[in-house]
């Protein structure tokens, strides 16, 4: 037997065994979530000590997003782990097949060669059996590879980096810096910039508190108390300055592009919000859709602005409508069939995200507006969902509530429906991501969330490299191709 054939004979069962074990193990779900050790029963208030009736039971207290209850944990009887059992069965089956092959008499293994000189029909029959056996092995390897494919998708997509629990994030920059509001060592509320584990608290406009809402091109924007008013600010090169006010009232800066153009809201003398553009040191009212009220939330590098505005008389019963402002004109983006919508972000391709009431005003759903069409991105079943941000690749992040309890989870959307970020992020532990507020072009996401004990703070999600399972999946493909080539030559 040639060296190549000996190697193939040894490596094929090993490759198949590894592929089957991997695929069955991951298909069974053990790497994604460990088997539970305890059952849980929620106890009524004022339960008696008789609630414990077994030495293996545990009394405890569980909390989720600030709501707590007494619980009783019961030990689950030990059972074989499904993934380990599947791997064991796969390996034993392959070992039994190899043992049977080794016990086969040499004459039986060479019958095809001996039959060539006697009966052509017999020769074809024996060769056919050999081909069928090899074909079975080839197909089995193909099935193993197919079963392993879902395991690749089960791998986490993001790693988690936690910021202090006293912070709330509102945006993320192209360099991965996070901005928002937090409490400093003196207990004061301040705007912050966090990057690579280091936190910088920004000064205020003279008042006791401030928070940051966005960052681009090395500048940070937000709002600060200044005397008796709130003023939008720009922080750049160690200095902070006010964007001013349109009509003497409060102002808040919400969006900034790499050129330093800023958008936001400013109240007029009647208390209505007015959308503004701050550019070149000048604050400009960009108008409305016909009503008295408007607010701007985002701006892209081309100066396209998005937000929400009260529409004109043709929509007397509607609330705000999402708008896109470009070339000096404000355009109504419409709704998803309900009476109100808002736009919160726009990328450089002109794609807009926000949320809208659906038909019958039954629920708020996130939307993506692209090529003149508003698309409903769906929800997790609750009545309130919102898309906060979109990057250059069109990946959308936000949050959606569930029908049960009204809780919300952060989501990411990329052409395949909403994905719960809690299900694809590694290392969260007892932390629950409730709202994704920003995403940059590198795919980094910043989200806010809470532990099951009620402590809340931001998390930076960084995309992970391609899962290792993909490499193991591809490792079996050359063996499969080699086997198919051998079969063609023998036929």
Image (tube, helix red, strand yellow):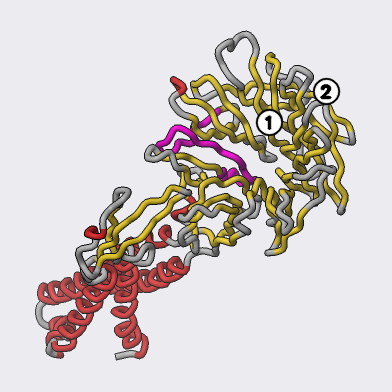
Say whether residue 382 is magenta: yes
Residue, x 31% and y 74% (percent of image)? 16
Q: Quadrant of the C terminus?
A: bottom left
What residue span does the magenta drawing correspond to? 374-397
Residue, x 62% and y 54% (percent of image)? 166
Q: Position of residue 101 (x, y in %)?
A: 18, 84
Q: Are marks 1 and 2 in contact (CB under 8 Å)?
A: no
Query: What secondary structure is found at the residue carrying circle 2?
Result: loop
From the image, tell me which residue sits under label 2. 247
Query: What secondary structure is found at the residue carrying circle 1?
Result: strand
365 up-or-down from 30: above or below:
above
Say whether residue 381 is magenta: yes
Question: Which one is nearer the viewer's eye here, 469 or 312?
Answer: 312
Horizontal side of residue 318 vs 293, given as left or right:
left
Horizontal side of residue 428 vs 47, given as left or right:
right
Residue at the extreme top: 313
Q: Is residue 485 visible?
A: no
- Majority secondary structure of magenta residues: strand
Residue, x 50% and y 52% (percent of image)? 454
Q: Position of residue 348 (x, y in %)?
A: 69, 40
Question: Which one is nearer the viewer's eye here, 449 or 45?
Answer: 45
- What is the CA distance from the residue labelled 1 to the residue labelled 2? 21 Å
Residue, x 74% and y 49% (percent of image)? 191
The 10 Å Cα crowd at callout 1, few under 14, some 14 to 19, many 20 or more, is: many
Q: Position of residue 317 (x, y in %)?
A: 55, 12
Question: Which one is nearer the viewer's eye here, 413 or 69?
Answer: 69
Horizontal side of residue 93 vs 450, given as left or right:
left
């Amino acid at each position: 037997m040639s060296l190549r054939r000996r190697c193939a004979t040894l490596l094929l069962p090993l490759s198949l065994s590894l592929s089957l074990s991997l695929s069955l193990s991951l298909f069974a779900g053990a790497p994604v979530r460990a088997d539970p050790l305890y059952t849980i029963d929620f106890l009524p208030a004022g339960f008696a000590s008789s609630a414990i009736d077994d030495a293996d039971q545990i009394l405890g207290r569980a909390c989720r997003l600030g709501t707590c209850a007494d619980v009783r944990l019961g030990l689950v009887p030990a059972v074989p782990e499904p993934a380990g059992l599947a791997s064991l069965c796969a390996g034993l089956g392959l070992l039994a097949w190899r043992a049977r092959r080794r016990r086969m008499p040499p004459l039986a293994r060479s019958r095809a060669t001996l039959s060539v000189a006697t009966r052509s029909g017999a020769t074809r029959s024996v060769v056919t059996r050999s081909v069928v056996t090899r074909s079975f092995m080839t197909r089995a390897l193909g099935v193993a590879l197919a079963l392993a494919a879902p395991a690749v998708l089960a791998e986490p997509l993001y790693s988690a980096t936690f910021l202090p629990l006293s912070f709330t994030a509102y945006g993320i920059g192209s360099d991965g810096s996070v901005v928002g509001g937090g409490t400093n060592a003196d207990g004061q509320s301040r705007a912050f910039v966090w990057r690579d584990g280091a936190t910088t608290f920004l000064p205020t406009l003279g008042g006791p508190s401030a928070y940051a809402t966005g960052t681009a091109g090395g500048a940070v924007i937000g709002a600060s108390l200044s005397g008796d008013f709130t003023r939008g600010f720009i922080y750049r090169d160690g200095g902070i300055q006010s964007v001013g006010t349109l009509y003497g009232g409060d102002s808040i800066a919400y969006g900034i592009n790499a050129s330093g153009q800023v958008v936001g809201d400013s109240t007029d003398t009647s208390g209505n919000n007015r959308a503004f553009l701050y550019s070149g040191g000048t604050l400009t009212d960009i108008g409305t859709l016909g009503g008295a009220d408007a607010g701007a939330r985002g701006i892209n590098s081309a100066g396209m602005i998005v937000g929400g505005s009260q529409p004109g008389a043709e929509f007397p019963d509607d609330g705000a409508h999402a708008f896109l402002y470009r070339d000096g004109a404000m355009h109504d983006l419409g709704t998803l069939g309900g009476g109100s919508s808002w736009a919160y972000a726009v990328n450089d391709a002109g794609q807009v995200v926000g949320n809208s009431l659906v038909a019958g005003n039954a629920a708020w759903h996130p939307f993506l507006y692209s090529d003149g069409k508003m698309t409903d991105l769906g929800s997790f079943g609750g009545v309130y969902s919102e898309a906060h941000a979109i990057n250059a690749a069109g990946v959308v992040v936000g949050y959606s509530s569930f029908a049960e309890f009204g809780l919300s989870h952060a989501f990411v959307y990329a052409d395949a429906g909403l994905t719960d970020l809690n299900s694809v992020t590694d290392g969260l532990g007892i932390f629950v991501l409730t709202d994704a507020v920003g995403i940059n072009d590198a795919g980094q996401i910043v989200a806010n969330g809470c532990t099951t004990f009620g402590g809340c703070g931001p998390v930076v999600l960084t995309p992970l490299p391609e899962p290792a399972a993909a490499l193991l999946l591809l490792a079996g493909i050359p063996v499969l191709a080699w086997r198919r080539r051998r079969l063609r030559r023998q036929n």
